[in-house]
Amino acid sequence: MTHAPGSETQISLFSADHLRTLQRPTLVEPSLEMSHDALVHWIEAIAAFQRTVTIAPPLQQTSLFDAAAEPLLDAEGIDPFQLPRQNAEFWRWKADDAGVAALYFVIDCTVPVLLYVGETVKSNQRWKGLHDCKRYLMNYRQIHQRHQRPSSLNIAFWRDAPVDTRQRQRLESALIHKWRSPFNKENWRFWGTPFTTGS
């Protein structure tokens, strides 16, 4: 196509109608092809592993010098299944404050199985924005509904986490490794990624 000399109008290769269809968001349904037996096997394998995890008594600091150097970080003494739980949709509710530095654990209480370990500096605000794990949980619920299996997704906070971000993240990493929580990408090599597709 040619333009008249001095013309500043750009000619479009597409019609106005075609451009409007390109600008509409495309809704993509998650492609979750998992049989009932595969779902049961996946969950039972994770739950069986997590039942082998031992909880050690909390470590005690033995001297004033240790206490002054750095707070004691003890992933071995944290049992996510013994923490108070609340509905995983807690982030939709209005909170009176931003919360505290914490580690959090997403648990399907029907099994029970620990699905995700995370950390936050503000426990009441962590999931208000975008979070990949929220999508995984939606897919997890959908496949359970499709196979008419119950699920009860809850979240538990450990509010004694260090305020220092690096210390908190080290503790989070140790717990992810210890429990092999399947929605943490560090453990995808063990359990695969059946719930990470879709939008």
Image: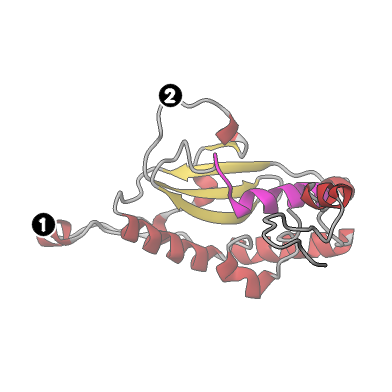
- View extreme (bottom): residue: 189
Instruction: Provide the residue designation for mark 1.
Output: 64
Quadrant containing the N terminus is bottom right
| Percent of width and height locating residue 68 | 13, 57
Q: Residue, x 88% and y 58% (percent of image)?
A: 36
Q: Position of residue 118 (x, y in %)?
A: 50, 54
Q: In the rendered structure, which amino acid carries the disc numbered 1?
A: Leu
Q: Tell me the CA gap for discs 1 and 2.
A: 37 Å
In this view of the protein, which residue sits in the foreground, 187 or 1? 1
Magenta-drawn segment: 128-144
Would you say 28 lies left or right of 173 here?
right
Q: Is residue 27 visible?
A: no
Residue drawn at x 43%, y 54% as measured from the top left: 78
Residue 96, numbered circle = 2
Residue 88, position as x, y percentages in the image: 61, 40
In the rendered structure, the answer to whether residue 183 lies left or right of residue 22 reads left
Which residue does the image show at 46% across and 36% down from the upper left? 124
- Which sits in the foreground, 47 or 57? 47
Q: For numbered disc 1, what is the local secondary structure?
A: helix
Helix, strand or loop at label 2? It is loop
Farthest left residue?
65
Viewer can see residue 23: yes
Left or right side of 181 for 118:
left
